[in-house]
């Protein structure tokens, strides 16, 4: 993860600078934020071998970038799934539920992987705490 982390972030930032309507670049940067922000203690400790943990990654940035991706490409199933996962990590259960349900309800035509992603969304939805 960490070996390429800075390059992935740099390329996502560059893609967004070149085309601010590139939804998938926001998606990539969001996943970068979430992955770095949720590194375990062991992973953070080992990061010294790769120049340390990159600075600035937050779950709030991940959510914001995925929200932008959804706004730009609302029928892309994976944006909704990943936003739901991010909301779940943030304990925003109602928002996570909404995004999983939206992704499941979309026709599986935005990617060849849509059906598999929708199955993952169903599994994630079933694991969310029940609403009060």
Image (tube, rainbow, N blue to C red):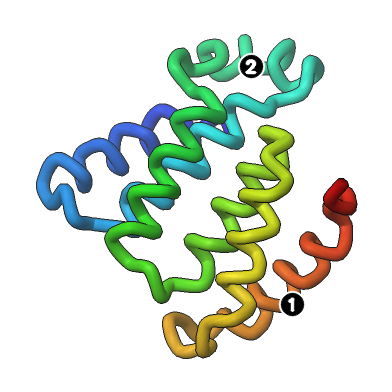
What residue do we see at 67% from left, 28% from top?
38
Residue 107: image location, x then y, percent:
51, 89
Q: Residues within 10 Å of mark 2 (few under 14, many from 20)?
A: some
Q: Residue furthest front?
A: 132
Relative depth, front residue between 37 and 43: 37
Residue 87: image tag: none
Does 59 appear above or below 92? above
What residue do we see at 49% from left, 23% from top?
57
Q: In the rendered image, which residue does mark 1 sit on?
A: 119
Q: In the rendered image, which residue does mark 2 sit on?
A: 47
Left-right relation of 123 to 33? right
Q: Quadrant of the N terminus?
A: top right
Secondary element under disc 1, as helix, strand or loop, is helix
Residue 53: image location, x then y, percent:
55, 15
Residue 30: image location, x then y, percent:
46, 41
Left-right relation of 71 to 82? left
What residue do we see at 58% from left, 55% from top?
82
């Amino acid at each position: 993860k960490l070996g390429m982390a800075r390059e992935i972030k740099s390329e996502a930032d560059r893609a967004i600078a070149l085309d601010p309507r590139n939804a998938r670049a926001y998606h990539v940067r969001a996943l970068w934020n979430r992955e770095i922000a949720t590194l375990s203690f062991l992973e953070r400790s080992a990061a010294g071998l790769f120049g340390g943990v990159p600075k600035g990654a937050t779950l709030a940035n991940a959510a914001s970038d995925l929200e932008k991706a959804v706004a730009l490409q609302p029928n892309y199933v994976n944006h909704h799934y990943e936003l739901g996962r991010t909301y779940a990590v943030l304990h925003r259960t109602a928002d996570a539920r909404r995004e999983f349900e939206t992704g499941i309800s979309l026709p599986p035509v935005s990617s060849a992987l849509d059906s598999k992603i929708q199955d993952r969304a169903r599994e994630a939805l079933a694991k969310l705490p029940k609403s009060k």
